[in-house]
Image (spheres, rainbow, N blue to C red):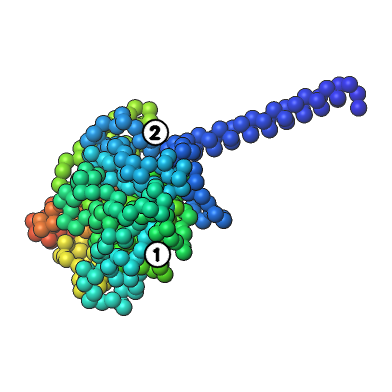
């Protein structure tokens, strides 16, 4: 090998080494940046020793989604702003049992994050014991056919004192006492307009005990969300519960998707498919064989306390915007949080979430007609849905004839028989649609998972003139149209004409 070749080889080796170092630095900083974005800072004093991971990690990682913005709880969030409603409004913190003291003593910790805008709290704690013998409710998770006729009262939890316990400082001599009093409950968990506030009642039941009285045979090592559902078979109300659970996970800075425990006795429903996809696992409280202890438990607010529900009775003047635009130019009147949430649902099912994916029109425009069908929703349901569009089949047939004869471009009219589709297939139909049409009904709540360029056309009976889906479209920044009926009959020509105009604007 001559000197010239030796010099060339030396240069090549140096370049290879430099390239390797560059790749290492890039991926290290990228990973650090991703973690910094996805999780709020937690100090060693906060959680060291509180949430040990014993054995292999069983929690699902958070997906990378385009609309994600950091969830850093800061005092700079403006009350009643869009961010306060949809994200980081939980900025007042009450350390009932401080984490720092718990680290030193090995006892429990408990805190609540309060949002003055939503008037509710996300509470969390470490080393918490649940005794299901002191929670009166049905077992939950049964097949619907096995519990026909069961009353709602049997399914909702009633908590005795000591249903939940924490270990306090003071050793074995510590006397049993309530964790919080009425003043704390009124400040951090006000009942408001909720007639039966199960989360307030749960926290009221928490008792502080000494170390000799705090015994556990089963431990849940991974962070776990405790959720109570009310109208668990209705998609709109279930979406409010999904949103509350998602927000609670982000507010408490969980590094992975938490596990779930339903603190209610409802039977199994089709909607549990999405719960299982979004979170790491699912159990019913009464399915534990005895008292169980959680290293880290998070208590999610009721779905009634989310902006999705509160927006029906109070003005939440927010408009959807892209996360990129809000990162560049923050705006108190705009939000990307609902788009982030919709992408979380789609990602949970394994669907692509990049908002710059291929144009929907490549294989023709999908026009999804969301149908209202008779089906058995819960033990007290007779299987009949209320008629919101009395001639729904006639309207669908008219749209089908028009679409099949439309020559300007290909239009695929999708028969959205959601009651007979899996949740994954429902979400797939939503994300693939260019236009979503439907009579006012819970099925339209799926538009939370619609992509940014989707157009919504709602057919509204005069008997059910409510703003649910107009608001969701507004908060996501979707184009929205409504046909307001006089009664429940829709002129098929009017619906077809409105769709023609929408498709024309889509270049079809």
Image: 168 above or below 262: above
Image: 146 above or below 114: below
Please name the residue shown 34% across and 41% down the image.
95
- The span from disc 1 to disc 2 (Cα, nearest Å) is 46 Å
Question: Is residue 103 left or right of 185 when viewed as pictured?
Answer: right
Q: Nearer the viewer, residue 265 or 340?
A: 265
Q: Position of residue 303 (x, y in %)?
A: 26, 53
Check disc 2 and report the residue beneath it. 324
Q: Residue at the left extreme?
A: 486
Q: Nearer the viewer, residue 287 or 129?
A: 129
Please name the residue shown 51% across and 50% down the image.
52
**Callout 2 secondary element:** helix
Check disc 1 and report the residue beneath it. 291
Query: 10 Å neighbourhood of mark 1: few (<14), some, or many (≥20)?
Result: many
Q: Position of residue 157 (x, y in %)?
A: 26, 64
Image: 326 above or below 229: above
Residue 386, by quadrant, is bottom left
| Residue 438 circle label | none
**Callout 1 secondary element:** loop
Asked if marks 1 and 2 touch (Cβ < 8 Å), the reply is: no
Q: Residue at the right extreme?
A: 1
Q: Position of residue 155 (x, y in %)?
A: 26, 68
Q: Quadrant of the N terminus?
A: top right
Which numbered mark, 1 or 2, is in the foreground of this view? 1
Residue 119, by quadrant, is top left
Q: Position of residue 507 (x, y in %)?
A: 32, 43
């Amino acid at each position: 090998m001559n000197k010239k070749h030796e010099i060339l080889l030396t240069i090549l080796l140096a370049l290879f080494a430099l390239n390797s170092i560059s790749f290492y630095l890039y991926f290290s900083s990228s990973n650090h940046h991703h973690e910094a974005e996805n999780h709020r800072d937690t100090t060693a004093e906060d959680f060291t020793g509180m949430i040990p991971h014993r054995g292999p990690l069983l929690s699902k990682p958070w997906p990378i989604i385009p609309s994600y913005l950091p969830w850093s709880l800061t005092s700079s969030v403006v009350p009643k702003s869009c961010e306060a409603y949809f994200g980081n409004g939980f900025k007042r913190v009450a350390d009932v049992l401080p984490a720092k003291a718990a680290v030193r003593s090995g006892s429990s910790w408990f805190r609540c994050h309060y949002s003055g805008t939503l008037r509710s709290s996300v509470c969390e704690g470490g080393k918490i014991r649940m005794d299901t013998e002191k929670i009166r409710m049905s077992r939950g998770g049964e097949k619907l056919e096995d519990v026909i006729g069961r009353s709602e009262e049997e399914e909702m939890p009633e908590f005795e004192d000591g249903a939940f316990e924490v270990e306090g400082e003071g050793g074995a001599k510590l006397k049993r006492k309530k964790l919080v009093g009425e003043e704390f409950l009124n400040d951090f968990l006000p009942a408001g307009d909720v007639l039966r506030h199960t989360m307030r009642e749960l926290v009221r039941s928490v008792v502080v005990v000494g170390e000799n009285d705090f015994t556990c045979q089963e431990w849940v090592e991974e962070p776990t969300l405790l959720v109570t559902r009310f109208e668990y078979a209705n998609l709109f109300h279930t979406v409010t519960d999904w949103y509350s659970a998602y927000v609670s996970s982000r507010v408490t800075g969980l590094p992975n998707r938490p596990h779930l425990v339903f603190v209610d006795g409802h039977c199994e429903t089709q909607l549990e498919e999405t719960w299982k996809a979004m979170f790491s696992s699912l159990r019913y409280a009464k399915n534990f064989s005895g008292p169980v202890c959680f290293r880290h438990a998070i208590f999610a607010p009721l779905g009634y306390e989310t902006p999705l529900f509160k927006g029906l009775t109070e003005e939440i003047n927010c408009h959807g915007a892209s996360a990129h635009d809000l990162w560049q130019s923050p705006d108190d009147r705009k939000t990307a949080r609902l788009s982030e949430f919709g992408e979380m649902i789609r990602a949970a099912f394994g669907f692509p979430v990049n908002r710059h994916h291929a144009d929907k029109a490549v294989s023709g425009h999908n026009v999804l007609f969301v149908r209202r069908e008779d089906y058995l929703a819960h033990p007290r349901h007779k299987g009949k849905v209320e008629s919101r569009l009395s001639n729904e089949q006639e309207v669908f047939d008219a749209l089908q004839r028009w679409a099949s004869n439309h020559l300007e471009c290909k239009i695929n009219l999708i028969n959205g028989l959601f009651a007979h589709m899996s949740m994954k297939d429902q979400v797939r139909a939503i994300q693939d649609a260019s236009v979503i049409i439907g009579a006012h009904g819970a099925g339209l709540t799926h538009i939370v998972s619609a992509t940014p360029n989707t157009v919504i056309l709602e057919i509204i009976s005069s008997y059910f003139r409510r703003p649910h889906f107009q608001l969701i479209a507004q908060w996501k920044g979707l184009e929205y149209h409504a046909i307001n009926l006089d009664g429940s009959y829709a002129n098929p020509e009017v619906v077809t004409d409105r769709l023609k105009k929408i498709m024309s604007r889509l270049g079809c």
